[in-house]
Image: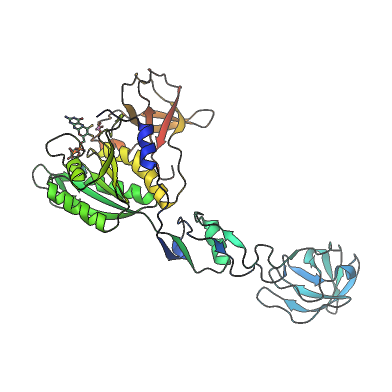
Amino acid sequence: MSLLPVEEARRRVLEGAGPVSRTESVPLRASRGRVLAVDLAARRSQPGFDASAMDGYAVRAADAATGSILAVLGEAAAGHGWEGSVGEGEALRIFTGAPLPAGADAILIQEDTEPAGEGRIRVTESPAPAAHIRRAGIDFAEGAILMRAGTRLTSGAVALAASGGYPDLQVLARPRIAILATGDELVLPGDALGPHQIVASNTFGIAALVEENGGEVLDCGIAPDDESAIAARFDEAYEAGADVFVTIGGASVGDHDLVGKVFADRGVELDFWKVAMRPGKPFMAGRKGAMRIAGLPGNPASSLVAATLFLAPLVRRLAGLADRPFTREGVLRADMPANGARANFVRAVFEGEDEAGRPRLLPLGKQDSSLLSVYARADGLLMRPVDAPAAKAGDPCLYVPLGLDG
Ligand SMILES: Nc1nc2c(c(=O)[nH]1)N[C@H]1C(S)=C(S)[C@@H](COP(=O)(O)OP(=O)(O)OC[C@H]3O[C@@H](n4cnc5c(N)ncnc54)[C@H](O)[C@@H]3O)O[C@H]1N2
Ligand code: MOO
């Protein structure tokens, strides 16, 4: 089977992938970063009454010419209105957020007054008509659509929902991503290692990536290199309604690489296997019914690179999150040799920026796909396209960010 170009593989993985149809209610405090499932109509108006925007006096503007003397009737503070009415030559002491009393039509700020004795004030600067009044509903009126379905809940959006009177919000459910590690050699971190065993580290990196991109992990654990064991976990994930079934390892051509065989046996429609990239070549994608399949290679860097390029954007789509640009612009910090027939995703660190603010990418020394110590240090994957000619330090390049806020 020929190797699929990376861009084509991404396009095919994302084809037809949209937000999951399940929704759930979450308390407002747990809603940050979630995606609204419904249009949100305000349950109240904000403010619910005409209010003062400043500390000062509620007055009738017509009576408050510079030099006028006004009799102060009483006081209104936020949360404590004043029931009477402001008449000719009268003022009410008022504080920011208090309701405007009847009769008054402007706020005279206290800086524009001076005491005139016996509970009276003198106006030193007359207020403009309707000065410093926040009208009822100026932020939003009851019934107004505050946010549309599909809005990602930022801190501002959470505050707006609170102000609109919502203690809970209906949001899209997180897509369920089942993750199965395969291999006789694998044990969980902290467990006793037999001879020739290693830790199943990939599961944890892939799970973190899934969660970073809005997914929920169904941990299917570790299956030995045994077709029926892998098939049993596949069936469990399918029956549990996983949106994506992710396998780690067993994706290559060895006698013990059984994932492809299990998929075929289980009626998975394989879309493609093997991408023209390094690391991560033996990535496979397909689907069975509504469940998508992502078969990641076992080598740690291969697994994480393939998941970053294909699984993360798929999870974002299913979660209703906006696509991220695949690559960003940087500049080379070192000369690079010509590249061959597979796009090369070189683990690199940032070393300063050029005048345009683009990061300078310095390739890390060792690029073997088993090296997590190198992968974890990398700020980005410097992309060397198929058949790219040699390049010089200072030349522009493209990279895939690896940081948490990338
Ligand atoms: N004759 C060929 N051999 C290989 C080819 C090839 O084209 N022809 N491709 C190589 C490439 S490229 C990769 S990448 C690997 C991928 O192989 P698999 O996906 O089958 O992975 P495994 O063989 O199961 O494991 C490879 C390596 O990774 C370790 N591993 C597996 N799972 C985990 C895990 N969950 N956490 C940490 N490490 C894991 C495993 O122990 C192996 O060392 O195939 C090449 N071979
Ligand atoms: O493509 Mo493999 O993923 O080079 O190590």
Front residue of 317 and 344: 317
Compared to residue 274, the image places residue 46 above or below, namely: below
Task: Give the image location of residue 24, x and y in percent.
Answer: 41, 63
In the picture, the quarter occupied by the N terminus is top left
Residue 379 at least partly seen:
no
Q: What residue do we see at 61% from left, 66% from top?
A: 143
The answer to which image quadrant residue 138 occupies is bottom right
Residue 400 at least partly seen:
yes
Determine the residue located farthest toward the bottom in the rendered image. 84
Query: Which image quadrant shows ligand 1?
Result: top left
Determine the residue located farthest toward the left in the rendered image. 195
Q: What residue do we see at 25% from left, 54% from top?
A: 238
Task: Give the image location of residue 126, x and y in percent.
Answer: 86, 63
Task: Give the image location of residue 230, x and y in percent.
Answer: 17, 49
Compared to residue 157, the image places residue 80 above or below, namely: below
In the picture, the quarter occupied by the C terminus is top left
State left or right for residue 40 relative to residue 104.
Answer: left
Q: What residue do we see at 27% from left, 47% from top?
A: 246
Q: How many marks?
A: 0
Q: What residue do we see at 72% from left, 70% from top?
A: 50
Front residue of 218 and 245: 245
Task: Give the image location of residue 75, x and y in percent.
Answer: 74, 77
Front residue of 272 and 60: 272
What is the basis of the colouring in this image? rainbow
Compared to residue 348, the image places residue 53 above or below, namely: below
State left or right for residue 11 relative to residue 124.
Answer: left
The answer to which image quadrant residue 306 occupies is top left
The answer to which image quadrant residue 260 occupies is top left
State left or right for residue 374 relative to residue 260.
Answer: right
Compared to residue 149, the image places residue 329 above or below, namely: above
